[in-house]
Amino acid sequence: MNMKLLHHARPNLAPIDVRLEPAYNALNSLALLNVVGKTPSMDAWVAATAEALSPAELRENHLLLGLLGAALVFQGEWPDFPAYLEALARQVPSTLRDRAQAGIHPNNEALHLLDEAEILLADPSELQRRALRHLLQMWDTYLGPEWQRVASDLDHHVKGIAYHVRDHPETFANNLHLLVDDAVLTATPQGTRVQAIVLVPSPHVGRHIAHVYREETLYLFYSAPRNFATLGRSQPIGRKELLLRIEALADETRLQILEMFATRDELTAQDVQERLGLTQSTASRQIRGLSHFIVERRGEGANKRYQLSQGQFDMTFRALKGLIAEPQAEGLDLRHEAGDVRRFMDRRGRITVFPARPRDKLLVLEYLAEQIELGRSYSEKEITEHLRRQLAFDDAVTIRRELYNMLLIDRERDGSRYWRIDPQRREELLHGVRES
């Protein structure tokens, strides 16, 4: 009998795009208010806003963005949420009613709203008026100020991740499987095929992936910061890095830290200290040991905030599975060839030496540049500290200067802010002169 390892064939994905989608993004954020208390680890804004709403506002939100939410989702392109509201006001009321009726799937928690929903469905103009009033109130009071705070970062992320979608489509699609099940990516609940996938970076979805299907297009809402490294990674996990990742999990204290994320979207170093009874230095050291799996967002010292990156766990265990299957097919490179940056790494994955040969120097610098989040602006202190964590020697300032000289990062004239240069933009700069 002939025998071979079984592999689960992955279906081809529909074309993938990444867009900000301000209107759908806002609707998704408002819909998240309905699941506070039922879904753990939501973004802090969602929990705080749900707590600030009156019982009447919460009920209206459950009715209009939950039970009747399908009425609000229709095709169109709008530069912002107010423009979407204007388009909603121009919709034919009976069309809203028809969409709402087609999308009603009441669960036990929505049964108490069915009578009120039937009244609105019988009066489509009132349904439209109530929806507009509620959405405008939520935007003006809660979501509008929040969107002003997050929109710029989200826009930068879209531009950054678009490079990977455009130049590494197969790798990107493979990475997307780490975050979303095949069943969601390829088929709708009705059994029809997905013809297009739009990734929408959400400021509020937390560790979760929300999705909406409309007109043969699947919209996936995901957290931009915590999933950037997973979606944008173009190189497989090598043997040495895999060992580092596994070793990081073989520690009771670190497992306790990961367990704390079960009910929290964010943790501070202070949270870890108090919960586990650790000193500040011990808590910081244990958190650094989990750097492959958690994302540092903001704050200083004990107030630094960290988020869990679910995709990094899936990426790790996919690489581990590759060891017992067919490593080359799984993309697990077990060799250390001349072009392999791991020749210059220690067991913790840090660069041990800055090589003298130009080719090796560029190899190391390109690797370090890939660890810088595309689309994010760093202060001088933040970029220096970020590089210092990647090095086993104390000369982050030199590395920062070399990255700048090699057109891998750029900065403000006074050196106050640094950011990674988009690879396509770098190619353009290499054929010209850096703009002054």
Image (cartoon, grey):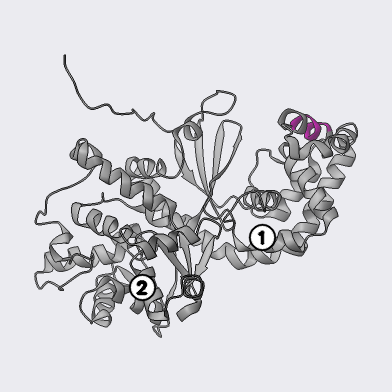
Give the secondary structure at mark 1: helix
Give the secondary structure at mark 2: strand
Percent across and percent down for residue 127 are 85, 40
Badge 1 or badge 2: first in the primary sequence = 1
Query: Residue 95 lies in magenta, yes or no?
Result: yes
Q: Residue at x 51, y 77 (%)?
A: 303
> Is 320 drawn above or below residue 376 in the view shown?
above
Query: Residue 28 lies in magenta, yes or no?
Result: no
Percent across and percent down for residue 368 are 27, 66
Please provide the residue range marked out in magenta: 94-99
Residue 309 seen: yes
Percent across and percent down for residue 435 are 36, 73
> From the image, which quarter does the N terminus lie in?
top left
In the depicted view, which residue is nearer to us: 355 or 47?
Answer: 47
Q: Residues within 10 Å of mark 2 (few under 14, many from 20)?
A: many
Q: Main secondary structure of the magenta part?
A: helix
Name the residue that disc number 1 marks.
47
Compute the Cα span from label 1 to label 2: 37 Å
Residue at the extreme bottom of the image, as rendered:
414
> Is 247 drawn above or below residue 282 in the view shown?
above
Q: Residue at x 71, y 62 (%)?
A: 49
In the depicted view, which residue is nearer to us: 64 or 379?
Answer: 64
Q: Amino acid at mark 2?
A: Asp
Name the residue that disc number 2 marks.
410
Residue 348 picture quarter: bottom left
Percent across and percent down for residue 165 are 39, 47
Residue 342 picture quarter: bottom left
> Is 109 drawn above or below residue 158 in the view shown?
above
